[in-house]
Image: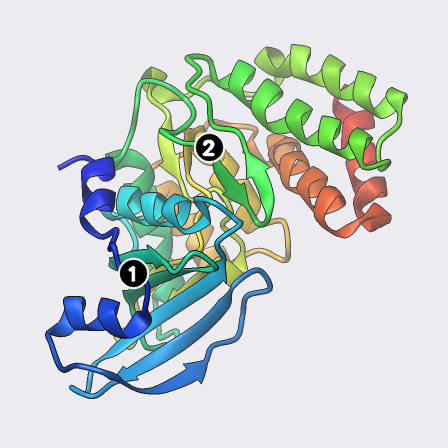
Amino acid sequence: MSTGDRLEAITFDVRSLDRAVALLKGEGTTVRARRHAGGGSINDAAVLELADGSTLFLKQNSASHTGLFEEEARGLLALAEAEGPRVPRVLALFSDGHTQTFLMEYIASGRKGSGFFSRFGRDLARLHRTNRNDRCGFERDNHIGSTPQRNRWTRDWHAFFGEHRLLFQVELAQQRGHADTTMVRRTETLARKLPDLLPHVEDGRPSLLHGDLWGGNYMVDSEGQSVLIDPAVYYGHREADLAMTELFGGFSPEFYRAYREEWPLEPGYEKRRDLYNLYHLLNHLNLFGRGYLGSCQAILKRFS
């Protein structure tokens, strides 16, 4: 069954949470309690305790943000196809016309035990190795945070990263008054130089990436296993995922050592890391303002 078919199977033609729960869990099952869940600035999130003793995780947002949860569900479904970290099961999507709702498996948080980061590193390498494509991009555009993320299918990684990642973001920054013409020209120059700066994807087969893999977008389950949440998936070079893990402090050295043991990187990754992360810094410039401008300019100056 394709991702689209599975998405259609969980899209409910209902207008109330109670009805969706009844369809999922059986007639007569009701929501007994609702606990607010923190950690997100875009959606309202809650843990639902049901009368049958089970739990669900709920996300809600305005129905005006069309397709927001469909994008997330597609991403989780794609990640679940790989031999990688655990992801929450997607269960139901529906809208009452004013609010869109996404129900998924509730995963209780656990503690990082001994060897957690080694297992996580190996699992991420397996994800990158077992869900691959012959093109960069994804079946739909999606979002990274609240910023649109363009995922048009593209054969060449350098063309994809240049046009749909760097240039797209800097053009948004110019529209919002954060980037001047010099910054745009430098980004255009950098995009042309990417074939000399970044490696090709291995065997011409891009890997499925989480897309926004910082410390807030993974969790630990009750068994001490890694869980990926809040994806911004696309197919691209796996180094882009690794670079993002290092942008805001990085993970344990055990994580990177285990990843490389499972699937070694080409020499020079450390020199390329900031170039991949320019995409995320430009996105933060667009989301949060000019506090990120200096970091973007420094990387552009260095590489262009």
Label annotation for residue 287: none
The foreground one among 181 and 148 is 148
Q: Residue at x 45, y 28 (%)?
A: 237
- Separation of disc 2 and disc 1 at Cα? 21 Å
Image quadrant in which you'd find residue 89: bottom left
Q: Residue at x 61, y 12 (%)?
A: 196
Crowdedness near tag 1: few (<14), some (14–19) or many (≥20) residues, C-alpha within 10 Å: some
* Quadrant the N terminus occupies: top left
The three-letter code of the residue at mark 2 reads: Asp
The three-letter code of the residue at mark 1 reads: Pro
Q: Is residue 167 left or right of residue 140?
A: right
Q: Secondary structure at mark 2?
A: loop
Q: Is residue 118 above or below residue 292?
A: below
**Which residue lies under the disc numbered 2?**
141
Q: Is residue 170 left or right of residue 42?
A: right
Image quadrant in which you'd find residue 208: top left
**Which residue lies under the disc numbered 1?**
88
Q: Secondary structure at mark 1?
A: loop
Q: x, y percentage for residue 218?
A: 43, 61
Q: Is residue 217 left or right of residue 50?
A: right
The foreground one among 217 and 115 is 217
Of the two numbered discs 2 and 1 in the rendering, the one whose residue sits closer to the viewer: 2
Q: x, y percentage for residue 242?
A: 49, 43
Q: Is residue 303 above or below residue 276?
A: above
Q: Is residue 187 left or right of residue 9?
A: right
Q: Is residue 27 above or below residue 96?
A: below
Q: Residue at x 13, y 82 (%)?
A: 28
